[in-house]
Image (spheres, rainbow, N blue to C red):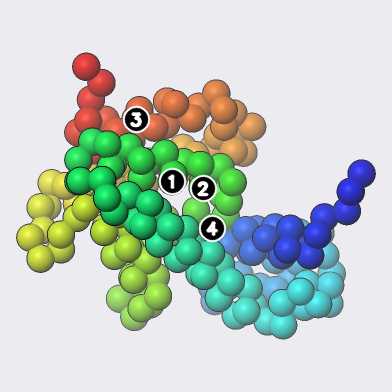
Amino acid sequence: MLRPTKSEIEAEIIDRASGLFAQHGFAHASLQQIADAVGYSKAGLLHHFPSKQAVYDAAIRGLRAHAEAMRDGVKDIPPGRERDKAVIEASVSFAFQRPGIAALGNRIALDPDPDDKEMNEIGFIMYQALGIDLARLDMERLIRVTSAFSGLGITAALAVRSKLSEEWKDLIIAAAMDGLGHRKD
């Protein structure tokens, strides 16, 4: 069996730590909890990341990179059903691949911090991906997006934990599309 590469190890650390940050908040997630979650000693963890802040910063970079790639991937699709579906599909895939980072992204909706500039910017990038114009805010659309993506995040996390990702994928996408008002005909 092949040993994981350094980048694979670090990706696993970042994802597991992100899940802890999402659950407990940055201040209440400890280096020891992160080390325990990935099966390393605290010293082993510090070999990969010099501090808890460095792990958090890497998680935020990963979340931002995902949001930017998603936004850039749909920029030529006009706002509407097709664009929403592309964003939802990308979000579900990301949640299956990086459930901890996806959970950290959900924290934007669950516990917004007006002083967390980076997380707020990531939220705005997601709004851009979905074609939301904050200058002409449609409250119904905002509520639908928040509801659909919160539900998507929770259900995708449950699917990963239950090892049912493939079985639930299309159902999660359909439910999120319904939440956005795009019912199947």
**Circle 4 sits in a helix, a strand or a loop, which is it?**
helix
Residue drawn at the location 79% of the way across and 65% of the way down: 6
Q: How far apart, in angstroms, are the residues tagged by discs 2 and 1? A: 5 Å
| In this picture, residue 63 sits left or right of residue 161 | left
Mark closer to the chain start, 2 or 4: 2
Are discs 2 and 4 less than 8 Å apart at CB? yes
- Labels 1, 3: front one: 1
| In this picture, residue 127 sits left or right of residue 171 | left
Nearest the viewer among 86 and 172 is 86
**Circle 2 sits in a helix, a strand or a loop, which is it?**
helix
Q: Position of residue 106 (x, y in %)?
A: 42, 55
Q: Specify the label residue 91 is tagged with.
A: 1
Q: Amino acid at mark 4?
A: Ile
- Per the image, the residue denoted by label 4 is 101
Q: Amino acid at mark 3?
A: Ala
Are discs 3 and 4 less than 8 Å apart at CB? no
Are discs 2 and 1 less than 8 Å apart at CB? yes
**Circle 1 sits in a helix, a strand or a loop, which is it?**
helix
Q: How far apart, in angstroms, are the residues tagged by discs 3 and 4? A: 22 Å
Q: Is residue 139 above or below residue 83?
A: below
- Per the image, the residue denoted by label 2 is 94
Q: Amino acid at mark 2?
A: Phe
Q: Is residue 109 visible?
A: no
- Per the image, the residue denoted by label 3 is 175
> If the image is split into quadrants, where does the C terminus sit?
top left
Q: How far apart, in angstroms, are the residues tagged by discs 2 and 4? A: 9 Å
- Labels 1, 4: front one: 1
